[in-house]
Image (spheres, rainbow, N blue to C red):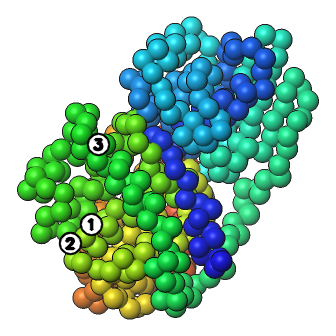
Amino acid sequence: MHPFIELIQADMIPALGVTEPGCIALAVATAKSYLKSQPEKVFLSLNSGLYKNAYTCGIPNSSHYGIKYAAAFGAIMADPEKGLQSLEGITQEHDLLAEQFVQENRVMVQLSSISSALYCQATVYAKEQICVVTIEQSHTQITSIMLNGRCIYEKAVQKEGNKSALIHNYSIQEILETLPSFSEADLSFLQSAFDMNLSLFNEGLKSHKTVILHQLYRMNENTIFSADVKKSASLLCNGAIEARVLGLSAPAMSITGSGAHGIIATLPLYAYFSIEKCTKLQLYQATLLSYLVCMYIKEYSGKLSAFCGCAIAAGTGMACGLVYLQKGSKEQIDMVIRNMASSITGMICDGGNHGCVMKGIAAVDIAFESAQLAMANVSIESIHGINGTTIEDTLKNMGQIADPGMKQTENTIVDILEGK
C-alpha cells in the first residue's frame, strides 16, 4: 500500500459531533469501564486547545453543551468501544441524568497548559476505586491507564516539539507526480468520507436547528446543486458543519482529528464534481491532495491551536483540490497556496461552536476566489508576507503562525471564554 493511502486511511475516523467532547467522553467512559460501581465524580485536566474547543460545543442528541456535559455523559452512558462515536444513543433519560450529575457539581475541570498538543486526563472516582485515563496527541490515543494507583496500561507518546511527520518527507511536487498513478479502485475508500459527510448534511437539511443551512439553501435557489458552484459548495460544506457543531445525530468523517476539517476538505470538491461533471477518479485524486495539504499544515500547527485549522489548513487543501480539478499546473498549485496564505492565515479558533459555520463560509469563499485567480496565473508573490520561497516553506510558515506564533492568543481566548 502506498504511504499516502496508508496515512490517510489511518487518519480518517468517523466522529459523532465535535471531536473534542467525543475525546472527553471516551476518556471518562474508558475509566468507568474499569470500575466496579457507578462513577461518583470526575476530575478533568485538559490542554487549552481541547478545553477551548469543547467549551460550548453541542452534544449529539442532547439539549446541553460543553465540557462538563461531555464528561457527565461519559460517566453515565458512553461506550468506549465506539471511540469518537462513544456518545451515540443519548436518550432523554440520559439527558436528565447528565443534567443532575453536572448540577450536583460532580464534574471538575482544570486547564493543564496552554498548548496545541492534545492532552486529556480523566480521573474518575467510584466507591473505594479511582481510575485515571490519559489521552495525548490524538483524540483516541490512550497513553496510560492507572487503576487505584497502579499502572495497568502505558504507551509511549511522541513528545511535543518533535515536528517530524511522514507527510513532511515528501514535496508537493512528489505528491502531484504520484496522484495520476492511483486508480479509482485504489482511492475508492475515500467514497466513505463523501457518503458520511453528505448524510450529515442531509440530517441538517431535515432539522429546524440549522438556521444558517436553510438560509444558504434559500440563497442557492432552494436547491442543493444550482448553476452557482461556489454557493452550492458553501451550502453543502457549511450545512454539514452546522449540523455537526449543533450536535445532530449523524457522524462526520474526520481528518487530522476534526470533523470540520474533513467536511471542508471534501464537500466543496464534491459540489464542483457534481456540477462541472468531473470524473470520479479526478474527484478522488483531488481529495487525496486536499487531505495531504491539510495534514502538511496541521503537522506544523498542532492538532488544537489558536488558529482555525478548518479554514486555514483544510481550506488550503480544498483550494488545491479545486485547482487540480481544473487541471491546474504545479505552478498554479503554488499560486493558490500563496493566495490562501496571504488571506486567511491568522483566523482564530474560539472553540467548536456555531461560529464555525461562519469560518467555513469564509473558507469556501476565499478558496474559490484563490483558485480562480491561480487559474488565471494571478497570485501574491513569494517575497510578500509569510509566503516562502518554496511551496513547502509557505505551508510550514502557515503552520508556525499557530505554533508557536499564537500561543498568547490561545491564552487570551480562554480568558475571554471563562470571563463569560
In this view of the protein, which residue sits in the foreground, 296 or 412?
296
Quadrant of res 251? top left
- Residue 115, horizontal then vertical, whole percent: 63, 47
- The crowding category of the residue bearing disc 2, from other C-alpha atoms within 10 Å (few below 14, some 14 to 19, many at least 20), is some
Kind of residue at badge 3: Gly
Residue 271 disc label: 1
Find numbered disc 1 in the image and state the secondary structure of the residue it sits on.
helix
Asked if 323 appears above or below 400 in the picture, the reply is below
Whether residue 311 is situated above or below residue 40 in the rendered picture: below
Along the viewing direction, whichever of 378 and 79 lies nearer the viewer: 79
**In the depicted structure, whether residue 144 falls above or below residue 376:** above
Q: Are marks 2 and 1 in contact (CB under 8 Å)?
A: yes
Gap in Å between the C-alphas at discs 2 and 1? 6 Å
Q: Which residue is mark 3?
A: 204
Q: Which mark is residue 275?
A: 2
Q: Amino acid at mark 2?
A: Ile
- Label 3 Cα crowd, 10 Å radius (few <14 / some 14-19 / many 20+): many
User: Can you say which quadrant of the picture contains the N terminus?
Assistant: bottom right
Q: Circle 3 sits in a helix, a strand or a loop, which is it?
A: helix
